[in-house]
Image: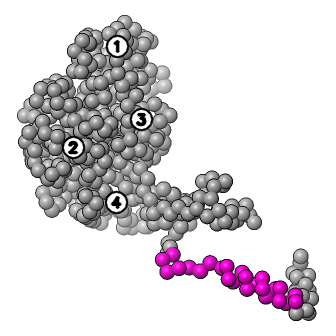
Amino acid sequence: MSETNRRNFLAAAGAGAAAVGTVAVTAGTARATEARRKKNSAQETVVAYVKDHRSSELRLMVGEREVIVNDRDLVTRILNAAGGN
Amino acid sequence: MSSHREAPEISKDPVADGTDVYAFVSPKRPSSVTLIANFIPLQTPDGGPNFYEFGDDVLYEIHVSNRGTAEPDVTYQFRFHTRVRNPKTFLYNTGQITDISDTTWNRPQFYSVTRIKNGHRKVLGRNLRCPPVNVGKRSTPDYAKLSEQATHSLDGGRKVFAGQRADAFHVDLGSIFDLGALRPFNEVHLISMPNMNGVNAVQSFNVHTIALQVPIRELTRDGSVPTNPMRAKAVIGVWATASRRKSRIFEQESGTYVGTGPWEQVSRLGNPLFNEVVTPMAEKDQWNAREPRGDSRYAKYVNKPELQGLLPVLYPGVFPNLAAYTEPRADLHAILLTGIPAGVVPGFQNYTGAVEADMLRLNVAIPPSSSPNNLGLVAGDPAGFPNGRRIDDDVVTIELRAIAGLTIPLVDPSYTPDGAASAVQDGTTNTNAHATNTFPYLGLPGGGYQTEPGTTQAS
């Protein structure tokens, strides 16, 4: 969709309350799931290592530590990002 | 050898490559033990303009086990950092270096020493100066002075040195790794050639040495200074390691590597030649990454060493008794993996228990010898290898003869060694720079200017 067409689409969507609501809900959902940094989050370079793309294991190198995370969703998002998605 | 470039992976990473470990009761301070770990093998002294130095991104460690578990009870860590004083010049030194603090040395290196004991870390020294390398007569005209200035006294009667020295190891690498040839026995080799003297392949090469002298009581399990060599507490196991960060990223902007994550061991060394000639090629890299306490997996290679099988093949008819010997090599198992238990050599033991582990075992209750024999224990000198290892111990000959069957009768009196077992050698003598009789004992490193090319021939 070209930029011109996108503007047209949004303008058209804004013409109806239901459509506006849908857009608002989507944006709100995105804000609700957006990760926020915690106080003890890493404050330095982190290297992420997915050794086996079929596994849910993610290894994070930070400082002199290695943090092993088992999170299939996170691994999937990294794999997708690595694939250019 | 003894562990110079001994495994495929570490041979590509010389800064982390451990070459030799020494451990002995200090001759002039017999209440102390000297621990030495060498790294960065086969340095040509004229290897400028970027001369050799310790890795700022490598963790160097010397470990001591004193409870029979083959786990480190005392560890000394060495971390280095390098400065560039003048970023505008390509020179290693911008003038003569006559004092270790001279600003003409453009790339000084410093280090810290930390002891870990019973889970407690204690910094023993920080911002300690290394000496520069021995560049040559103009740049480092009084190298002995620089070396002396780089020998640091620490609290508690400890001494430390970290810097370039002459390699003390002598071996005929060129011959041994040319189908197991020993030049003095060339005529009886399967591919016969005229006999000749050995060629010391390590002669004139430098290494980087970490040397530490500490009171014996700091290393024993109960903090005592044992006087009875038959007591278990008199024996310590020693090995050295080098570790790198688990992740290494090349930063294009700076043109350097940046490490992240925990330290992972990439090199280790206890007994000379273990990973070199005992561990099969396919397992050498893993061996370097593992800890001694898991060495039971390598016991089969000690009990039936490949070299034992090769000697009768390479030297037909010379080792008939060895060829016929089919029992597990309990003698080598004791020397390399458990220490020699009481009852084998009268008045001596360096047994650390049943845990099979490649460690250099030192009985600290054995005093320094007044007339050292470089063939050590097998020649009746219990202060030498395999009771620890001194600078001048001829470990190649000792281990060659042991593998050839000379030490089998220690555990199997029914065995008669072949005549060649007590004569086999690589034919080298110690033609390296002379060891000194004071800490850090290894000879001064060869100078770059003073170095002349070797004699390489294609045929």
Q: Residue at x 15, y 51 (%)?
A: B222
Quadrant in which residue B18 is drawn? top left
In the rendered image, the residue lying farthest to the top is B317
Mark 1, residues whose alpha carbon is within 10 Å: few (<14), some, or many (≥20)?
some
Asked if the residue under mark 2 is in contact with the one under mark 1, i.e. CB atoms within 8 Å, the reply is no
Going by the numbered disc 4, the residue's amino acid type is: Phe
Q: Specify the amino acid type for callout 1.
A: Tyr
Q: Secondary structure at mark 2?
A: strand
First of labels 3, 2 by sequence position: 2
Which residue is drawn at the image coordinates 16% and 59% (left, top)?
A: B153
Magenta stretch: give its range: A18-41
- Answer whether residue B185 is magenta in the image: no
- Residue indicated by mark 1: B325
Secondary structure, mark 4, is: strand
**Residue B80 image label:** 4
Q: Is residue B213 above or below residue B378?
A: below
Residue shown at 58% from the left, 62% from the top: A70
Q: Chain of mark 3?
A: B
Q: CA distance from mark 1 to mark 3?
A: 23 Å
Disc 2: which residue: B236
Asked which quadrant contains residue B19, the reply is top left
**Disc 4 to disc 3, how far (Cα)?**
34 Å
Precedes in sequence: disc 1 or disc 3: 3
When the figure is inspected, residue B9 is found, relative to residue B163, above or below; the finding is: above
Are discs 3 and 2 less than 8 Å apart at CB? no
- Amino acid residing under circle 3: Arg
Q: Which mark is residue B297?
A: 3
State the image coordinates of residue B157 (x, y, percent, origin top left): 12, 57
Real-space CA distance between mark 3 and mark 2, rounded to the nearest whole angstrom: 22 Å
Q: Say if labels 1 and 4 share a chain.
A: yes
